[in-house]
Image (cartoon, coloured by chain):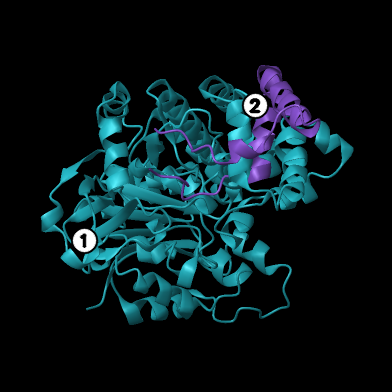
Chain colours: A cyan, B purple
Amino acid sequence: MAPRGANLAAEASTEVGSFRDPDSRVLVTADGVFRVLSEEGLADWNALVASRLWREVQQDGSVVASEPADLDALPAGLVRGAAAALRHARVPFVSYPYEWTFSMLQDAALLQLGLNRRALEADLTLKDASSYNVQWIGARPVFVDVGSFERLREGEPWAGYRQFCMLYLYPLMLQAYKDLPFHALLRGAIDGIPPHDARAVLSSWRDRLRRGVFANVVLHARLEARYADVAGREVKREMRQAGFGKALLDTNLHKLEKLVRSLRWRAGETAWTGYGEHNTYDGEAAGRKARFVREAAARRPRGMTWDVGCNDGTYARIAAEAADHVVALDADHATVDALYRALREEGRTDILPLVVDVTDPSPGLGWRGLERAPLERRGTPDLTLCLALVHHVTITGNLPVREFVGWLASLDSALVVEFPDRSDPMVQRLLSGKPDGANPDYDKAGFEAALAARFQIDRTEPVSQTRTLYEARLRV
Amino acid sequence: MNLLAYLDPGTGSMLVQLLVGGVAAAGVVAKLYWDRLLRLLRIRKDKPELSEPEPER
């Protein structure tokens, strides 16, 4: 979907991630995000807008705001043979399932299934079931692939079932049943986890008895292997003749809804958020830090803020007071999941929590590495918060201080950064497992020199005996 | 007419949808296998059905 940031939209191009569906392609131009429809795609769109469903999903915000657009206003070379065009609202920041938390993927799955069931009532269906079709406005999921709605062909099984399993159900099951994080698996394969692979992990007898595993994983893997050489069209016809139809489709979707809803990731639920770092602060120091962040954010024009290493989101929330959108990044899945659930309860649409390890951020994936963009290619912040993070990245992650500051500078934004010196209890703890003199570049003078080389430091304030806050702008 | 969706649903994945359906799908499964049985016993011919077009939508 729509990447934010003028630099990305400067050149009109077909969004590579959308080329798989020939009836509905996405174009990003300087004017916005467009969807170009074939004759088939247009017929499906017409059926969709004529339905009550369309008015409902536009009103409740579950499908991205979309309207007809002028085909002739789009670059001729990119719309050859097209029948019509739509214009979509932009989402504040594009994110991918391997950056979401368990609860986010679960909510996206329920949105996907719920929309499909509502579509059936209007004699429509969703032609696929990719988790990449969901984006976020803060903690609210939005279905962005309007081109996925198509007229129902009575008697056909759900074409998206396999994709639903690979990109939603199996990742959720592996996290819930095996406490196996799904991020690396989804990041490793753009199509998700195949039935065979899910079967290989959910292999014990106990696993087979877990809810949904026998049919959706074990049988699915077996039937897929056994019928690999059988033509799908033949089976489709047989199923139709045997009476497979809308009612059964709805039953299946409803069963999947109940299954997805029943999945629980216990580690995430019991995780204590706001770990150690907060304990190193007394109330007064925390108050000073909050004030510093609040003042720095208020000084900037409203825009996009990234909170890198957001922890429980305390400072993301403060930054949100003076920003249109905040992307809150942290490597700890359980912590971010708790933050998401809190934001969801509050109905927040201005803070997007994501699981991202900045020492190993999301790369480009898929065909030519272009189908899914690297994190920084999807937009950059106007203000970056980097609190209680430098020591983790440089001491635990062994990244040179200068290198990390260079990355912060590459974000091309203003910066609020916290530096705990070597005597800080948390720094001591991180260094305790290392030989004496490890990470010699980690000291206050060295950090300040590295920072000053790239940034103009506007304000410095000691926040505790061992920690200092810096507010800085990029040198031009 | 769109004969083939851009996404191949996968033959095994189609069949498993009958099994996921549980009780609600039992009738369909029974009919599916009954039809296959009849064809196997040559009580019903399957050749002419091959040319049957996909339904108009």
Left or right: A302 in relation to A164: left
Labels 2, 1: one chain: yes
Task: Classify mark 2: helix, strand or loop.
Answer: helix
Q: Quadrant of the C terminus of chain A?
A: bottom left
Rendered location of residue A314, percent (x, y): 43, 43
Rendered location of residue A377, percent (x, y): 37, 66
Above-or-below relation of A428 to A191 = below
Q: Given the image, on which type of amino acid does mark 1 rest?
A: Thr
Residue placed under numbered mark 2 in the picture? A262
Question: Does the residue at mark 2 contact the one at mark 1 (Cβ under 8 Å)?
Answer: no
Rendered location of residue A167, percent (x, y): 57, 47
Query: Closer to the camera, A392 or A235?
Result: A235
Rendered location of residue A147, percent (x, y): 35, 44
The chain carrying label 2 is: A
Above-or-below relation of B2 to A403 = above
The chain carrying label 1 is: A
Q: Given the image, on which type of amino acid does mark 2 rest?
A: Ser
Q: Earlier in the sequence, mark 2 or mark 1?
A: 1
Please tell me in which quadrant of the rendered image residue A19 appears. bottom left
Residue placed under numbered mark 1 in the picture? A29
Q: CA distance from mark 2 to mark 1?
A: 42 Å
Please tell me in which quadrant of the rendered image residue A258 appears. top right
Residue A65's tag is none
